[in-house]
Structure formats: structure tokens, C-alpha cells
Amino acid sequence: MITLKDIAKRTDVSVTTISRVLNHDDTIAVSPETKRKIFDAAFALGYQLPKKRKLLKNALLIGVADWRIIIGESPNYSIHSLQYYAEIELPNQVITFVQLKKSEVRPVDGIIAFGGLSPEEISALRLSSPHIIFVNNYQENDVYDHILIDLASAMTQAFDYLINVRNYRVIGYIGGKYIGDGYAIGTHRIQQIIDLMMEQELYHSQLVAVGDFTEESGYAMAKQLLDGSPKPEALIIGSDMIAIGVLKALEERNMKVPDDISLVIYRDIQTVELPGGEYAVILSYPEILWQKAIQMILERIHGRTETVQTVIFPHLLREGESN
């Protein structure tokens, strides 16, 4: 059986501190990072507090359909973030989140689904649970609850910052696009950036690079723009995974951010851990997203029938503020 000592070995935190954190002792002074590390270790090891074991008969099992945003062997931030905020917000409710595989039918109490899913994928999810919350799925649908991030606001903030605050005129965009049967990913932000560039008469087709949502694609696209003409003074990066590759390309050329080039990285749902750096970030208040997703799926499970749509407006952290 997993004990507090097992968590202590994994986290290098004392058993006393771990016990107080897991029991939601508000009088203990620990950093948010340490608290998150303790809960993540407890989730990963499958530890349950004695008082939580008594609540297991009323436990809820929530499926997470996130295959559209998890790439390769990347850490699953969706599962860990949902588990963490469920524990913080609802310490007296046992909720377990499990990752659903594409086309898998697995009976669960509810589902939180991320990204653009095809009609066939949605139909398959319905076989697992009638209660589904969609996050960043921009298909027209008035049956299910949706949490949407205002992409237009995100791209406008990034563009305005580079033009009006940093006074750049040669701005490039590096992003990803994926089009499947009945769904698309990345097309909204690409079109928004092109429209903004054209409005300001700053559009150059050679400054817009679109590829896969991978580090390798980001690396290749960055090299393409840096070797081309005109050379960008600043770049807007459409995803954090792509940004990893862009940063690698800049490091190879000994280009410093923001001295040699400025970056604005758009992050809606965190899929990778970005290295530190003097770049700007468009954040979508991830803690609010996780909290709303949990709140909405529990409302559905407990009988709410009205359809709800929540829109989150991103916020720009300027260069240096994101670290």
C-alpha cells in the first residue's frame, strides 16, 4: 500500500509537510510549486487519504479525450491539471480522471474533450457517457457544453503589442494546421493573423509559415523564415509545441530574444513545458479553464440540462513577465 513515505521519497518533501498539504491545512506556508508537486506525486502513485477512502463508494470517473492536443510522448498536463484542481476545489469528493483512447468505449460518468473532434469521434464518445464538455471545439453544436478561448482576442493582443508597443513592422507567423474529416485545428488563428497583417498593410506571404504541430516542424519553419526575405523582426508562434522548435533554431544561430528577435507565444491548453526566456506569452488563464471544466461536467452529471457556453479571453504577458 502506498504511504506518505513513498510520496516523500518521490518529492524530497517531509512527511509532515506532505500530510498537512494533502489534508488542506491552510496554515502551512509552502510554495504553489511544492504543493503541486506533492499532489502530482500522490496522484501518480495512487495514494488516497484515509478519509478519502471512506468516500470511494461515491467516487466519480471522468474520461479525458485529449488525443488532439497530446503529441508523441509529451507529458499529459490535462490529466494532472484536472486532478489537481478537482482536489483543491472539491476535497470531499473523490474524482478520478482517466485518459480515453481514440474510438475507445469505456463507461465513465462524464467526459471532458479537448480540441477539434470529428463527428465519428464524438459519436464514439457518446457510447462512453452522455455527459460531455468540449474545450476548444469550434464546431456549431447546441447540445453540448463548450469552453472556448477567444482566438481573435489572443491574436489581436499579440499583433497590437508587437506593432504599437515594440514598434515592429516586419512580423512573421509560425503555426500549425491540421484538417480532418469534419474538423480543423489551427485555421482560425492563421486567418486572424493574416487579416490583421493585411489591415495594417504588413502582410508578406513569405512571412507566414504553416506546418505540423510538432517541435520538428517549428524548427524547420523558423529556419525557413530566418533564411528568407524579408527577415522578421518579430515572430508570433501559434502553439507551445511549435515554439520549442523555434527556440532551438534561434539558439543554433546564437540569436537572443528579444535583442535579436522578439517572440510572442500563444498558449491555450498547455501541452509542453517551455524553457525560460525573455519572450511574451498569450495565456488563457489555465486555472480558470480547468476549474470551469470540472464545474460544468459535475453540473451535467448532477442533472443540469441547459446548454452552457463559456468564453475565456486570453491575457498578454509581456517579455520578461512570463518567467
Image: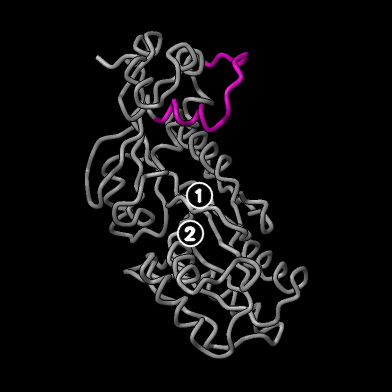
Amino acid, disc 2: Asp
The vertical placement of 43 against 140, above or below, is: above
Q: What element does badge 2 sit on?
A: helix
Residue 28 included in the magenta stretch of the image: yes
Q: Position of residue 17 (x, y in %)?
A: 49, 15
Which of the colour schemes (rainbow, by chain, secondary structure, one colour) is used? Answer: one colour
Q: Residue furthest front?
A: 254
Is the C-beta separation of discs 2 and 1 under 8 Å? no
Residue under label 2, please give it: 240
Residue at 76%, 75% in the rendered image: 167
Q: Position of residue 256 (x, y in %)?
A: 58, 68
Left or right placement of residue 82 versus residue 2 in this view = right
Q: Position of residue 188 (x, y in %)?
A: 52, 69
Magenta highlight range = 24-40
Quadrant of the snapshot with the N terminus: top left
The vertical placement of 122 against 196, above or below, is: above
Q: Nearer the viewer, residue 145 or 275?
A: 275
Crowd band around label 2 with a 10 angstrom C-alpha radius: few (<14), some (14–19), many (20+) = many
Q: Nearer the viewer, residue 153 or 164?
A: 164
Residue under label 1, please give it: 146
Residue 246 included in the magenta stretch of the image: no
